[in-house]
Amino acid sequence: MENEGKVLVIHPEKCTGCRLCEMVCAVRHDGASNPARSRIRVMKWEMEGMYIPVSCQQCQDAPCMNVCPVGAISRNDELDTVEIDQDKCIGCRTCVAVCPFGAMSFNTTDRKVFKCDLCDGDPQCVRFCEVGCLEYIDAGDVSILKNKEAAAKLMIANQKATML
């Protein structure tokens, strides 16, 4: 599957908190319906009634990669992902501490870190998200999408202002 230059885009305003993405991810990677083994996490803000999926952003200058003392984290240029070599990982969790998105996880059984690998270019969380909260799109389309969202918010704000 051609995926060079694609990114996982999250629309938190669409998330219903069903956590199906977590289950699908855990089953895909570990064969068990266990959200603790998921590479995507749905964070819940009770007071606001909001759910926000959190996943690795595959940073170009990845802090996790830069701090790994054994070089277990590297960039796969073909898939444009940041990957963890489980054979090299010593489980020190330095990468977990520096991830600005909180997207690195630690498996207490294997004593290794893990994160989203975009399912090798076919993210199953996207495939199974019924509300369209998750998209896997061309990186170039992200700015267009953000411009449309900003324009829509501005239009709503202007409509509210004219009503006053």
Image (cartoon, rainbow, N blue to C red):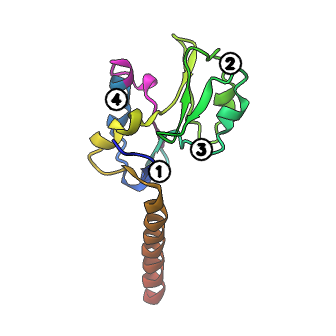
Q: Is residue 54 above or below residue 33?
A: below
Question: Which numbered circle lies on residue 59?
Answer: 3
Q: Which element type, helix, strand or loop, lies under badge 2?
A: loop
Mark 3 or mark 4, which is nearer to you?
3
- Please give the range of residues in magenta: 29-45
Give whichever of discs 4 and 1 has the lower sequence position: 1
In the rendered structure, are the residues bearing label 2 and label 1 in contact, judged by CB atoms less than 8 Å apart?
A: no
Marking on residue 23: 4
Rounded to the nearest whole Å, what is the CA distance between mark 4 and mark 1?
26 Å
User: Which of labels 2 and 4 is toward the front?
Assistant: 2
Measure the alpha-carbon separation of dots 2 and 4. 26 Å
In the picture, measured across the screen, residue 68 lies left or right of residue 59, that is right
Would residue 100 be counted in the magenta stretch? no
Residue 27 image position (x, y, % from top left): 33, 23
Amino acid beneath label 2: Cys
- Residue 58: image quadrant is top right
Who comes first in sequence, dot 2 or dot 4?
4
The residue identified by callout 2 is: 92
Q: Which type of secondary structure does the marked residue at label 1 adopt? A: loop
**First of labels 1, 3 by sequence position:** 1
